[in-house]
Amino acid sequence: MNWAKIGLFAAGVLFGTAGIKVLSSKDAKKVYTETTAAALRAKECVMTTVTTIKENANDILTDAKEINEQRAADAAAEVIEDAACACTEEAASAEESTEA
């Protein structure tokens, strides 16, 4: 029988049992609680930042849509002006040709 292997196994069981005792102690639970509380605070901070970014993105999107609508309205007004000028010129040409 190999006593070294048995000794290593026994030491592993002993350290494992001691480790479980340490991990389930009051001090360890306090550390877990503090760590969890810190993680929850960090999560809240991240969620606040995400909410702010979403609000800013929505504002930017709304402003961009307004700019595009204004540009489209300006372009449409320009087309109407061009068409009105063309109609006026055609009417003037037609009037000149009937007078002549």
Image (cartoon, helix red, strand yellow):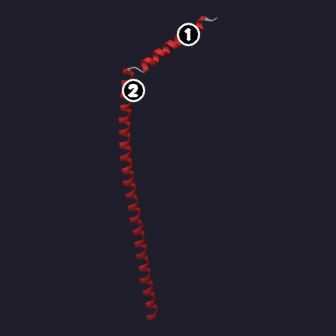
Q: Secondary structure at mark 2?
A: helix
Is residue 100 visible to the viewer in this orientation of the structure?
Answer: no
The residue that mark 1 highlights is: 8
Q: Residue furthest bottom?
A: 99
Q: Is residue 9 above or below residue 51?
A: above
Q: Position of residue 82 (x, y in %)?
A: 43, 76
**Quarter occupied by residue 37:** top left
- Specify few, some or many for label 1: CA neighbours under 10 Å numbering under 14, 14-19, or 20 or more: few
Q: Position of residue 81 (x, y in %)?
A: 40, 76
Q: Earlier in the sequence, mark 2 or mark 1?
A: 1
- Specify few, some or many for label 2: CA neighbours under 10 Å numbering under 14, 14-19, or 20 or more: few
Q: Is residue 9 above or below residue 77?
A: above
**In the shown orientation, is residue 12 left or right of residue 84?**
right
Say which residue appears at 50% left-offset and 16% top-offset. 16
The residue that mark 2 highlights is: 32
Q: Is residue 59 above or below residue 50?
A: below
Q: Where is the N terminus found, in terms of image quarters?
A: top right
Is residue 31 visible to the viewer in this orientation of the structure?
Answer: yes
Q: Secondary structure at mark 1?
A: helix
Q: Is residue 43 above or below residue 34?
A: below
Q: Where is the C terminus found, in terms of image quarters?
A: bottom left
Q: Nearer the viewer, residue 8 or 66?
A: 8
Amino acid type of the residue that numbered disc 2 sits on in the rendered structure: Tyr
Say which residue appears at 62% left-offset and 6% top-offset. 2
Q: Which mark is residue 37?
A: none
